[in-house]
Image (spheres, grey):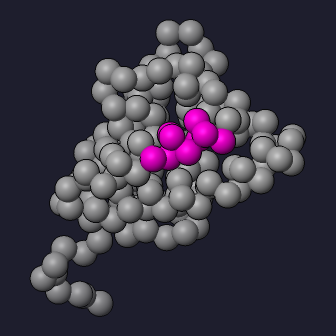
Amino acid sequence: MRESTLNEHKAMQDRVDRIHLRRRGAEATADLLVDLVVAPEGKVNRDELVARMERITASARVQELRDVHMAIAPDYIRMIGEALRKSGRVVTTKNMAHLTAMVNGTLLASMLFDGSDPRSDVRAALIPVIDVLAPLAPAPGDAETD
């Protein structure tokens, strides 16, 4: 389990490393995060997503799994934060915790229904909250006003 988790994180970091720095609106940012935390378009593997959700929920019951989850959670949150910063977004630790919890909860709910589309479900959940949890940073050269 630890090896598959580490492989998942390495693949996620590789995708983060390829993100180009540019300001993104809410929909473009949501699309980027969906590619990052669910799967790139056309590459959704429900079995892998279910295994991830099982690992997370089992961590609440099994101390050894909780230890693994708590060891990898900061990297997961850091990668999401890095993707958001590369999208011209303001990132705070508190809001990243809220964002990851919302994404994981949406993904878990999506896995419960046959025929659901986890990419669409997570995207639909992200769009209304992305500007609240990770607002656009002021553009370079924007004057501050009181």
Viewport quadrant of the C terminus:
bottom left
Residue 67 placement, left or right of 38: right
Whole-percent x and y of residue 144? 23, 87
Q: Is residue 111 left or right of residue 19?
A: right
Residue at screen point 62% across, 55% down: 73
The residue at the far bottom in this view is 146
Q: Could you say which quadrant of the image residue 36 lies in?
A: top left
Please check the rendered image and state whether residue 4 is part of the magenta-colored stretch, yes or no.
yes
The answer to whether 69 appears left or right of 143 in the picture is right
In this rendered view, identify the residue nearer to me: 62 or 126.
Answer: 62
The answer to whether residue 22 of the structure is visible from this angle is yes
Q: Which residues are magenta?
A: 2-10
SS assignment for the magenta stretch, majority: helix
Camera-nearest residue between 2 and 119: 2
Place of residue 54 in the rendered image (x, y in percent of width and height, measured from the top left):
70, 30
Left-right relation of 40 to 142: right
